[in-house]
Amino acid sequence: MYEAASLAHGNTKVIAGRRWDVKPRSVFWIAFLILAALSTLWSLASPIFSVPDENAHATKAIAQVHGQVIGYQVPGIRHTVVDLPAEYTYAAHILCFAFHPNQPANCGVELGDEGGTNWFNTWVGAYDPLYYYAVGWPSLILDGSAGIYGMRIVSGLLAAVFVAWGFQAAMSARRSRWMPLGLAFVAAPMVVYFFGSVNPNGIEIASAVALWAALPRLLEQFDSRKVAAELSLLPRWHLWTIVAIASVTLATARATGPLWLVIVVGICFIATGWIPVKSLFTTARSYVPLGTIAAGGIFSILWTLSGGSLSNQAEKSDAPLVGASFLEGFVHVLRTTPAFVQQAIGYFGWFDTPLPTAAYWLFVIPVGILIVLAFTASKRRGLVTIAVVTTAAVFVPALVQGYSVSQTGIIWQGRYGLFLYLGVTILAAWLLSAKQGNRVAFLSTRVTWISSTMIAAYGLLAFVVVMWRYVVGSGEPISEMWKNPAWQPPLGWPTLVALYALVSIAFVLCTGWLAARAARLDDGAELTVSSAAVDSLTEPALRG
């Protein structure tokens, strides 16, 4: 199962310990296939533009790949106007079901039908263009709704790549027994729902996940206090590649991206301590990826400042508390944090499709167990880390919204904080996987099996509820989905539900299997680390 190996780090030859028989490449493909399947099924499960702001993002992407990067201003029309090809003409009645949970999705017209306009006034017209180029190209070869579904699928595949990188980095070290659980929350329905939509929020979450998972592993390789047996099996350049691409993507996904990047990186620095951070910045080979990340951040900031994608002054009717003070906005967000958390873990559509209240416990219990274990098992730095990341998850939204409330009003939504909430679970699992988590190590496999099953059940329940809402409307009995479906998604809702159930089973099996493998590897950690320590002590004596 294991084989001895030696690696050269810099000029010092160290013992790498035992190599895991599940290769990092296999971990990547397992995670990619499962996340790609989940996001693709979500992309097909709901009608086009049923995801918040998807009409604005999709029309920008369509116009952009057809040559119109920003759009133009029209007197009397508030937002930036973009031109649309004839096959993508837009009529407001497409969204006849939005905000009306009892209305199934068969009430509207199709994208590209006669009577629609060949332009759309999108409120994201001046956003950073990189994401829209990446997902907009299917509209060049597909027409109407098919083009939107194609863009959704591409967006989900891109997100799956970043999440798979995160799994690969997280599982590449021998001490990783809790990491499958920490990353399992990426399969939460609200996360994969946005992965499979035309909305940069999805790629923002996915790139943050990759960064949360890969940056601590990279910093471990710069930590002189760790023996080689505790280091990642991935070469440093591979981890740097993941960190650099994820950082640039996070920084350019939305206007707030550079701030999110600083927050994620800063918390990871706190988690690992000053020694590896100093070593990283004083190593010459770090300058190229650091320069790439800096260039991406600067580009995003300059585009935001020059392109006009910062929010304009809102009117009183646009959002609550327009013109309010920082303190009023800050306190309001803190008071409504429970509502934002509910939005983040399961509130679909244009805030018209909540889940049954009892269902949320299927998700909350695994999160609570992981965080409580991290708090109880961690020592000083671990306690500081988990305290900082949980505090950030609560207070960063309040601080950001308080700063902008006078201009924008309260526009924060729970999904904007998903990149922080997932950071809590990933870092909690990383801390538990370290030596300080040895006291509860015996629980890792069992807790991962149970928790991943609960997450999968929660996801399947959410999938069925959302299909119910659009197929017959939430006001009708669920049995009407069989008897008299008013709307059908591509492939039909029974096929999609069956496929989602199969993928959910695969998710549980793979997550539990990875946790069991990691636990077996970790069970031999003390012996291997001790052997490396003995070798490091005896080698000078033998030379003498």
Image: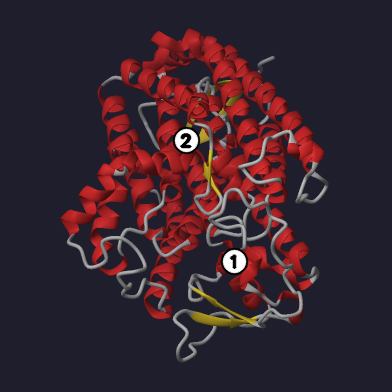
**Secondary structure beneath label 2:** helix
Up the image or down, 87 lies above or below 499; here it is below
The percent coordinates of residue 437 (x first, y second) are 40, 16
* Residue 297, picture quadrant: bottom left
Say which of 61 and 32 sits in front. 61
> Is residue 397 something one can see in this rendering?
yes
Q: Which residue is mark 2?
A: 217
Give the residue at x 33% y 34%.
Answer: 271
The local crowd at label 2, few if under 14, some if 14 to 19, many if 20 or more residues have their Cα within 10 Å, is many
Name the one closer to the observer, 517 or 524: 517
Picture coordinates of residue 533, whole percent (x, y) = 42, 15
Where does the image place residue 212, in percent across and percent down from the top left? 45, 41
Q: Is residue 319 left or right of residue 406?
A: right
Q: Quadrant of residue 150?
A: bottom right
Foreground: disc 1 or disc 2: 1
Within the image, what quadrant is residue 434 found in? top left
In the displayed structure image, the side of residue 396 where residue 516 appears, left or right? right
> Hey, what amino acid is under mark 2?
Arg
Q: How many marks?
A: 2
Q: Calculate the distance from the C-alpha at mark 1 to the C-alpha at mark 2.
A: 38 Å
The image's mark for residue 207 is none
- Looking at the image, which is closer to me, 464 or 189? 464
Question: Where is mark 1, residue-wise?
Answer: 55
Residue density around tag 1, few if under 14, some if 14–19, many if 20 or more, within 10 Å: many
Q: Quadrant location of the N terminus?
A: top right
Instruction: Note whether 401 is above or below 339 in the view shown.
Output: below
- Of the two numbered discs 1 and 2 on the same chain, state the one appearing first in sequence: 1
Residue 374: x %, y % from top left? 37, 21
| Left or right side of 20 for 408 | left
Q: Amino acid at mark 1?
A: Asn
Give the residue at x 43% y 61%.
291
